[in-house]
Image: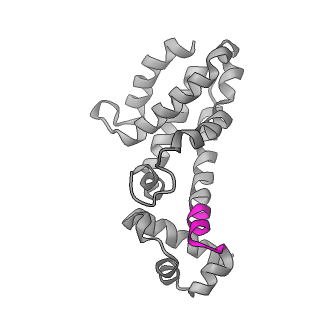
């Protein structure tokens, strides 16, 4: 288990500091202080190594996001807290932030990104309907809108929304009419 964790850590460090193109079995093995054979015996391939590394950090982040949004009462507050926590977590985890940069060999940021993101959004935004059942007829459109909004909040920084509180006010102003 220690080798697996070391390999995941080394993979995330390489992604964070040098992008996805820097991740290969040799570089990860060297960074983790293990043999290439160890990498292959634990993960089987470079693709599985990258996938499992991203899943490990994404799972941690999803737990934080779920907890941040769970304490809300309204659909608008749920989305606002989810997006504020999402930005804070992604900006605090450079390896995940690297997933949002268009780059060769980036396993996430490609033409199919939204299609893969929507099922994840569906899972995490399900509490919207508990908070406001009237949103049901437009739920699929809302999922896509909020997913695209979440990506833009992380990728496109702005002086106007730099702090969590500023972002919270901005999102609430524009989402409240939509989600009430």
Q: Residue at the front extreme?
A: 111
Identify the residue shown where x is 71% and y is 22%.
130
Would residue 48 be visible to someone looking at this image?
yes
Would residue 74 be visible to someone looking at this image?
no
Task: Report whether 41 appears left or right of 82.
Answer: right
Q: Main secondary structure of the magenta part?
A: helix
Residue 103 picture location, percent across and down = 39, 56
Task: Report whether 26 appears left or right of 74.
Answer: left
Identify the residue shown where x is 49% and y is 47%.
89
Q: Which residues are magenta?
A: 43-53
Q: In front: 73, or 21?
A: 21
Query: Which quadrant of the rendered structure holds the C terminus?
Result: top right
Colour pattern of the rendering: one colour
Residue 33 picture location, percent across and down = 52, 85
Q: Is residue 88 magenta?
A: no
Q: In front: 123, or 113?
A: 113
Q: In front: 120, or 166?
A: 120
Q: In front: 145, or 105?
A: 105
Q: Is residue 47 magenta?
A: yes
For the image, the number of numbered tags is: 0
Identify the residue shown where x is 62% and y is 63%.
52
Residue 167 picture location, percent across and down = 40, 30
Residue 150 picture location, percent across and down = 48, 35
Identify the residue shown where x is 43% and y is 56%.
94
Q: State which quadrant residue 129 falls in.
A: top right
Q: Residue at the left extreme?
A: 159
Whether 167 is drawn above or below 20: the answer is above
Whether 6 is drawn above or below 80: the answer is below
Q: State which quadrant residue 53 falls in.
A: bottom right
Whether 92 is drawn above or below 156: the answer is below
């Amino acid at each position: 288990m220690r080798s697996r964790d070391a390999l995941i850590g080394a993979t995330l460090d390489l992604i964070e500091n040098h992008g996805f193109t820097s991740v290969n079995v040799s570089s990860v093995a060297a960074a983790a202080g293990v043999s290439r054979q160890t990498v292959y015996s634990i993960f089987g391939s470079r693709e599985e190594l990258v996938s499992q590394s991203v899943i490990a950090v994404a799972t941690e982040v999803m737990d934080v996001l779920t907890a941040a949004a769970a304490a809300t009462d309204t659909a608008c507050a749920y989305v606002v807290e989810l997006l504020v926590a999402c930005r804070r977590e992604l900006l605090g985890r450079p390896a995940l932030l690297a997933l949002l940069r268009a780059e060769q060999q980036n396993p996430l940021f490609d033409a199919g990104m939204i299609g893969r993101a929507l099922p994840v959004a569906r899972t995490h935004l399900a509490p919207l309907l508990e908070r406001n059942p009237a949103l049901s007829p437009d739920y699929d459109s809302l999922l896509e809108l909020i997913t695209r909004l979440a990506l833009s909040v992380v990728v496109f920084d702005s002086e106007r929304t730099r702090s969590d509180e500023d972002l919270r006010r901005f999102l609430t102003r524009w989402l409240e009419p939509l989600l009430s």
